[in-house]
Image (cartoon, grey):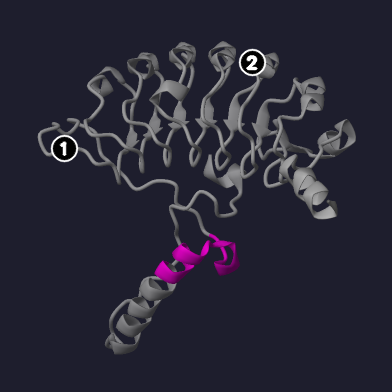
Amino acid sequence: MAKGKKKSSESKGKKITLKIAKNAVKLTVDGKRRLDLSNMEIATFPKCILKLCDVEELDLSRNFLKDIPESIDRFVNMRWLDLHSNNLEKLPEALGRLQGLHSLNVCNNRLTTHGIPHELGLLRGLRSLNLGMNRIEIVPSSIGALKELRQLRLFNNLLTRMPPWLHSLPNLQTLNIKCNPITPDSPPPLDLNERAECLCVVSEDSLCEECLLKHKEKKGRIDHWINEAPVTRKIIPVRLITPNSVAQQDPAVHR
């Protein structure tokens, strides 16, 4: 019985109080207020943070959230929202009412095509959208209305064809569609440079077991090349990079 109660308690996640939330408000390098509740084992959206809805940035990444309430639209000053690495299966329609939103990151969740509301197309000022590492088969055409979009990440999904509306995004600079089962007959996007994204410098103890193994294999090949290289060869410093958004990172550096 005691074990059952303990398990039930853990499934509810950590409780966030208003005091904890207030202490989690930080200033960004450009003077904006960010409510940082990332990696805190939160399983349920803490309603108390609605009393801090005047912040410009909200970080709820790396938690256990299954849904975001429609009341998210109370954050009227929101310009940056990070929800990556949760258990989200759908996004609230209210996101479309956050007209000041510039960046939205929902990478590494459980989103499907039906979990992306058409209201996202109302975010006319959105510049960065990360939908990577989900279960999306078709990206809603409403995304094609985001004329200010600069960065679009769709990597590691279930896309079989290129979104036909890509050419309607006049300001798109970065597109990442890697690791999708796109069929050979799907034409590539013209005048768009696909670049590897979601890279971050991390320590080895921040990596999952699979990524750590890959890193060690790659590092071994690099060390071998360095040891065998002539003294006169210029050696390029190597940084650890990983597309694993679950790894710890500093959002202020990466947005």
Residue 210 belongs to the span the image colors magenta: yes
Relative to residue 97, is residue 17 depicted above or below? Answer: below
In the figure, is residue 92 to the left or right of 234? right
SS under mark 2: helix
Q: Which residue is mark 1?
A: 183
Residue 188, position as x, y percentages in the image:
17, 34
Kind of element beneath mark 1: loop
Taking the spot 24% from the left edge, 41% from the top edge, the residue there is 181
Q: Main secondary structure of the magenta part?
A: helix
Question: Which residue occupies 42% across, 29% down?
Answer: 112
| Picture coordinates of residue 119, whole percent (x, y) | 48, 12
Judge left or right: residue 112 versus residue 160.
right
Residue 240 visible (yes or no): no
**Residue placed furthest toward the left:** 185
Q: Check residue 218 for magenta coloring.
A: no
Q: Splitting the image into 4 quarters, where does residue 60 fall?
A: top right
The residue that label 2 is drawn on is 70
Magenta range: 202-214
Point out residue 246 in the picture as x, y percentages from the top left corner: 54, 51
Query: Quick check: marks 1 and 2 in contact, CB under 8 Å?
Result: no
Alpha-carbon distance for marks 1 and 2?
Answer: 37 Å
